Image (cartoon, rainbow, N blue to C red):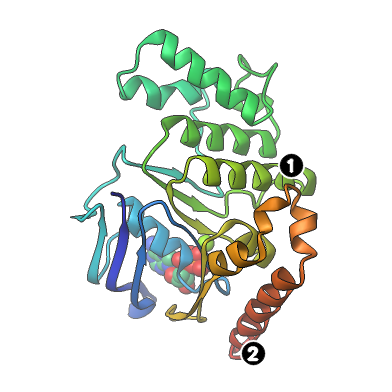
Amino acid sequence: MSEITFTNVSRSFERDGNMFLAVDSVSLTVRDREFVAIVGPSGCGKTTCMRMAAGLEFPTAGQVTVSGKEVISPGPDRAVVFQQFALFPWKTVSENIDFGLRAKGLDEAERRRIVEHNIALMNLRGYETAFPHQLSGGMQQRVAIARAYALDPDVLLMDEPFGALDAQTRVVMQEELVKLARLNPRTVLFITHAVDEAVYLADRVVIMTSRPGKIKEILDVKAVRDAENWDQHSRIEDVMDLASFVHLRTRIWKSLREEHAGDDH
Ligand SMILES: Nc1ncnc2c1ncn2[C@@H]1O[C@H](COP(=O)(O)OP(=O)(O)O)[C@@H](O)[C@H]1O
Ligand SMILES: [Mg+2]
């Protein structure tokens, strides 16, 4: 059972000698093997929430737990993919993906199998021995995603992981992630500013308010997906054409637009 819970979580930061509230009393449970996407205006505290689940940042009030334990540090139960990929520059593509597997203590044959599988999945064949600086930004991000998937963690934390990809690669990654998520469900917290992506991927979509970030509403996408049988379509464009999809997307857009209307700028 891997659940992520935020209980009345607030986080303040200091700016110019004053404290300001970035995240305001967020309470949310990402249930075991549920895929939750967070959307919200930029600066509303999405990344801060993610970093608190990863154990890279801590609440000033409230508590974050994973699998019932308070998060006090990063851990091997949680794999993290950020928009800013963090590969080891001195390691090859294969070595980067293999790194976490070594730490898990798997034998060499098993590690090689997992590395090869994820290289194929992320369309990185032929680049096994390349170094990060020899790859485009999109390819580096695919290595970072392969590395996270290879760990097969109970909890996957993804902060705008597809943000740097070109449109075609992004669609391939989204379709792959949906396939993976349905075949081998993990507990996923996923941040995006792309509303389509959130509705396509997630079981529930959390909409946050502009600063300080609070939860504004939570939409149950899975109920609609199951009722309207979205999964009979394998292509994202076919799902995005469905009236039930368009309806949800429009609802979220309207809700986000209200937040932007409230901005000072
Ligand atoms: N370490 C930090 N120190 C000071 N301010 C921070 C820090 N991290 C984030 N912030 C501020 O907190 C707010 C929320 O940031 P962030 O969580 O990155 O938002 P989002 O990911 O939704 O765009 C922003 O105003 C940001 O400048
Ligand atoms: Mg962010």
Return the x and y of residue 69 as percentages of the image width and height. 19, 53
Number of residues whose C-alpha sits closer than 10 Å to that of mark 1, classed few (under 14), some (14–19) or many (20 or more)? some
Amino acid type, mark 1:
Thr
Is 208 above or below relative to 3?
Answer: below
In depth, the one of 117 and 43 nearer the eye is 117
The residue to which callout 1 is attached is 169
Of badges 2 and 1, the one in the foreground is: 1
Q: Residue at x 52, y 81 (%)?
A: 210
Marks 2 and 1, Cα distance to the nearest angstrom?
32 Å
Residue identifier under label 2: 261
Q: Looking at the image, is mark 2 or mark 1 earlier in the sequence?
A: 1
Q: Is residue 198 visible?
A: yes
- Residue 110 versus residue 48 in the image, above or below: above
| Mark 2, secondary structure of its residue | helix
Q: Quadrant of residue 138?
A: top right
**Looking at the image, residue 213 lies above or below residue 155:** below
**Is residue 5 toward the left or the right of residue 239 in the image?**
left
Please provide percent x and percent y for residue 177.
59, 44
